[in-house]
Image (tube, rainbow, N blue to C red):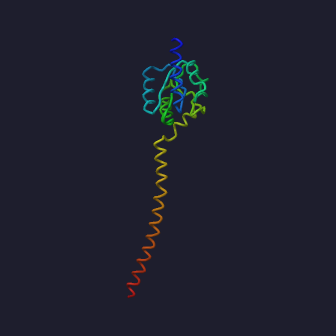
Amino acid sequence: MNRSEKAAIIEAIKVKADAASFAVLTDFKGMSVEELTNLRVSLRKAGGEYHVVKNTLARIALTDGKHDVIKDKFHENCGVALGFDDPVAVAKALSDFAKQSKLFSLRCGSLDGKEMNADQVDALAKLPNKEQLLGQLLGTMNAVPTNFVSLFANMLRGLLYALKAIEEQKGKAA
């Protein structure tokens, strides 16, 4: 690999890493190509990518970037997963894959430039995803006006019952 090829690889990694909000460094020593392909497919569905690059090139690409905090963790056989949209979905895909595979493990991560250890990445995977959080938020926001309407309906209903009772009393007296 000549210098210009290395420079192109470094630039491509740098662009992708800076566009990603979430990066996770993983160990994959001894895994087959088929297993890594399955991981890549599940990450693509979650809005992420998985790359295996030379450690030196990855260190250079991540230097002074958004995920600079994990650049020194590149050693031995490792790959980096990048998440672009929903970090929780990518963390879930990685965590689920790590549970299935004995050879795959999470090393560390970076969420918007803040370093995370493997346990923190697993904790992130246990959070509800973006759609679930939006659903909970909308349910909460919908509850306030619904309860407000119900409160006034009950007050008016009580007033109408009282007026009906008065009308019936006056009707009997006449």
Seen in the picture, residue 119 relative to 34 is either above or below; the reply is below
Q: In the current view of this chain or complex, which residue is farthest to the top?
A: 2
Residue 80: percent from the left, percent from the top? 52, 25
Seen as rendered, the residue at the extreme front is 4
Q: Position of residue 35 (x, y in %)?
A: 44, 23
Q: Nearer the viewer, residue 9 or 38?
A: 9
Q: Give the position of the C terminus as an image quadrant.
A: bottom left
Residue at the image point whose x is 52% and y is 23% from the top: 13
User: Looking at the picture, how far across and down is residue 55, in whole percent?
Assistant: 56, 19
Residue sitting at 46 percent across and 51 percent down?
139
Image spot of residue 11 (x, y percent): 53, 22
Q: Residue at x 47, y 44 (%)?
A: 132
- In the image, is residue 18 above or below residue 140? above
**How many numbered marks does the figure carry?**
0
Residue depicted at 46% across the width and 54% down the height: 142
Q: Is residue 69 left or right of residue 20?
A: right
Quadrant hosting residue 71: top right
Foreground of the two, 20 or 133: 20
Vertical side of 21 occupied by 143: above or below: below
